[in-house]
Image (cartoon, helix red, strand yellow):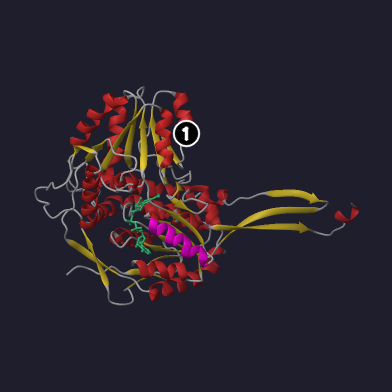
Amino acid sequence: MVDILKNYIGGEWVSGVGKPTISVKNPATGKTISKVPAGKKEDIDNAVKVAEAAFGKWRNTPAIKRIKYLFKMKQLLEEHADEIATICTNESGKTFAESKAEIVRAVENVEVACGIPSLLQSEFSEDVATGVDEFMIRQPLGIGACIAPFNFPIMIPFWFMPYAIACGNTYIIKPSEKVPGTMSRIFEIIEGVGLPKGVLNMVHGGKETVDALLDHQKVSAISFVGSTAVAKYVYERGTANGKRVQAQGGAKNPIVVMSDADIDSAVKIIVDSAFGCAGQRCLAASLVITIGDAREKIVKKLVEAAKSKTVGYGYSDVTDMGPVITLESQKRIESLIETGIRDGAKALLDGRNISIKGFEEGYFVHPTILDNVERDSELHRTEVFGPVLSLMHVASLDEAIEIVNDSEYGNSACIFTSSGAAARKFRHDALAGNIGINIGVAAPMAFFPFSGWKKSFFGDLHGQSRHAVEFYTQTKVVIERWHNEWTRKF
Ligand code: NAD
């Protein structure tokens, strides 16, 4: 018997309404480790009720007092980092080191949100007319929610939640049903923060839960992260219902390598980007475009470095790369590799059909490198979201940028070069929201926005930093005159 995870609503652990559950599996073993409620509209109704009841008092709590809870949250997350990372590794398959790195990124967002008293400060103009002043204040929206994907079970809700509650909103997190135990454990831990009941809630579930959030008239803002098709759906349905929505979607991240790059360091960084987290990062390199003789310098080395990755159970010290998330993902990735080869690509490294001793039921795909991938091939156009790196070769930087810009995605684009001029041209011309120069995973720090473009993002304001503060507040402009003996003199 495995546990059925509970929702956290109004400071209480409660069972989901309705019987259906979804099995949560350890991707390294294929074994069911827990079950999660499939989710009903009534679960969201219940969470919204308590969030609404808590809002009035919470928004009137001074910002300086609200952040005291966040300082405590940071402390608890750090104290329990190993425990959280263990659950994350068992549910998501990523290595223990990768899970620990997520906590660091989550905590950075809590730290930035602790600056909310300054971040909420606004503009004031004196004497816009004689004796008249004008200023702007930021006020919370009400109830916000985060709908999270599977690939960063710890970090992603923290791109939004700390800012939302620091700004005075109350909040609901809907974790991915593939990795729900990690956020459940985080909630058990951060219960120790002592937030007033109803300020922070968690509701498990799948599509019905998401739809209930998108349709609920009392939910004001939605932060979504996931695949492009669902991001677009969430954006359209949420905004049609009058909500603010920021929806981060899928990606296909190119890396351009110039002949003057430091090849050995580029190889290490690119291989870590392509195969770290089993290629399931939204900023993972999925395409390397070499320019000129960079091809001769780098291709063999990339293959050797990828081959040297140890694939296995994420909790083992020797593992560099864990499994992909589900059996369906494994099959989908393998079939995309097949499609790429069918369309003319050459497999320099083929990670299909490989079994790991002791983990024969796990969903493993080894690092795969496909050379000469065609620009119009299905493989090139599709987000693989697995450990598959495509290679293309061109003669000039202009051609490389044209390939980068032809993508329907725009999450990130990177270049490896020792030329400042080439790097500048690239950062200026590349149509992507996060640019890396001699960087393989262009992940913005918490004090910058996570700036996806094109079909990698639907909305205006991004997650993290000031963008999150603006997203979770509405501006109010006040024009003020006080009649008195002094103003009457003018
Ligand atoms: P997903 O779109 O399948 O699921 C994301 C969330 O949406 C989950 O909580 C899920 O329950 C819900 N959902 C799924 N299908 C739904 C539907 N039909 N209607 C309503 N809700 C639905 O994504 P995933 O597989 O969990 O995550 C991987 C994807 O997320 C990849 O495409 C990856 O690129 C993307 N991602 C993007 C970023 C970014 O910053 N742009 C970051 C991380 C992940």
Q: Secondary structure at mark 1?
A: helix
Name which residue lies at 19% across and 63% down. Answer: 32
Q: Is 162 colored magenta in this rendering?
A: no
Give the image location of residue 46, x and y in percent: 42, 74
Name which residue lies at 16% across and 53% down. Answer: 362
**Residue at mark 1:** 427
The number of numbered discs placed on residues in the rendered structure image is 1
Picture quadrant where residue 347 is located: top left
Q: In what quadrant does ligand 1 lie?
A: bottom left
Q: Is 235 colored magenta in this rendering?
A: yes
Picture quadrant where residue 443 is located: top left
Give the image location of residue 237, x and y in percent: 47, 65
Q: Main secondary structure of the magenta part?
A: helix
Instruction: Give left or right: position of 242 versus 211.
Output: right
What amino acid type is highlighted by mark number 1? Answer: Arg
Quadrant (top left/top right/bottom left/bottom right) for the N terminus: bottom left
The residue lying toward the viewer, choosing from 32 and 490, is: 32
Badge 1: residue crowd in 10 Å (few <14, some 14–19, many ≥20)? some
Instruction: Give left or right: position of 225 versus 461.
Output: left
The residue lying toward the viewer, choosing from 319 and 250, is: 250
Q: Can the viewer see residue 197 in this picture?
A: no
The residue lying toward the viewer, choosing from 62 and 260, is: 260
The magenta stretch is 229-241
Name which residue lies at 40% across and 27% down. Answer: 396
